Image (cartoon, rainbow, N blue to C red):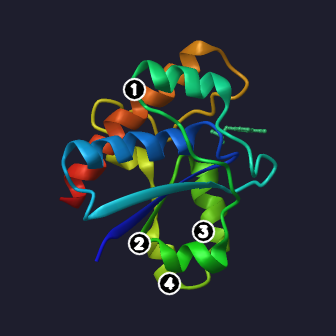
Amino acid sequence: MKKRLLFVCLGNICRSPSAEAVMNAYIKKNQLNDEFESDSAGTGGWHAGDKADERMQRHALRRNYNLTSIARKFDAKIDFDKFDLIFGMDQQNVNDLKVLARNESDLKKIKSITAYCSRFSNYSSVPDPYYGGDDGFELVLDILEDACEGLLNDLT
Ligand code: 4NP
């Protein structure tokens, strides 16, 4: 059975669509499309229906990640059943997901993405780039490339 991975941030327009794209690129590069798939969602619904933030899209495209996903709000009733592992981008996302968990099995699926970092192991969150400058978007991608590489190693 395919393992389904869900990346979750606050708005689902910056960090988690990037995590989804980076992970999908690594899955493809390692010819693991039959084994894994990834998606993303936000704990908040303000941006539901929107494309990824244009600044995030621009920075991601410079590294050949095409952010195509459309923002949606995390739905506990569907997503805890549909996904095998659910990764919060920061500690607030992890806490918000834990509050939504319906049982022990849901809780066990919730992880922090930065736990898989090696080069960026000093980060316990992917910092929210929304109100910052270019450096913040680059840092998001740097941390996510490190974390997704670690995650894929952990899963294979
Ligand atoms: P994200 O970034 O959680 O990485 O998608 C944000 C996007 C939008 C807002 C906050 C964070 N916002 O407040 O609208």
- Mark 2 vs mark 1, foreground winner is 1
Q: Amino acid at mark 4?
A: Glu
Q: Amino acid at mark 3?
A: Lys
Of labels 2 and 1, earlier in sequence is 1
Decide: few, some or many residues near mark 3? Use Cα within 10 Å; few <14, some 14-19, many ≥20: some
* C-alpha span from label 4 to label 1: 38 Å
Residue nearest the viewer, comparing 19 with 92: 19
- The reply to whether dot 1 and dot 3 touch (C-beta < 8 Å) is no
Question: Helix, strand, or loop for circle 2?
Answer: loop
Decide: few, some or many residues near mark 4? Use Cα within 10 Å; few <14, some 14-19, many ≥20: few
Q: Is mark 3 within 8 Å of ligand 1?
A: no
Residue matched to label 3: 98
Residue matched to label 4: 104
Residue matched to label 1: 64
Q: Amino acid at mark 1?
A: Asn
* C-alpha span from label 3 to label 4: 10 Å
Question: Helix, strand, or loop for circle 1?
Answer: loop
Question: Helix, strand, or loop for circle 4?
Answer: helix
Residue nearest the viewer, comparing 119 with 42: 42
Of labels 2 and 3, earlier in sequence is 2
What number is the disc on residue 84? 2
Q: Determine the quadrant in which ligand 1 lies.
A: top right
Residue at figure coordinates x 33%, y 41% from the top left: 25
Q: Is residue 83 above or below residue 49?
A: below
Say which quadrant the C terminus sits in: bottom left
Q: Is residue 90 left or right of residue 38?
A: right
Res. 154 visible in picture: yes
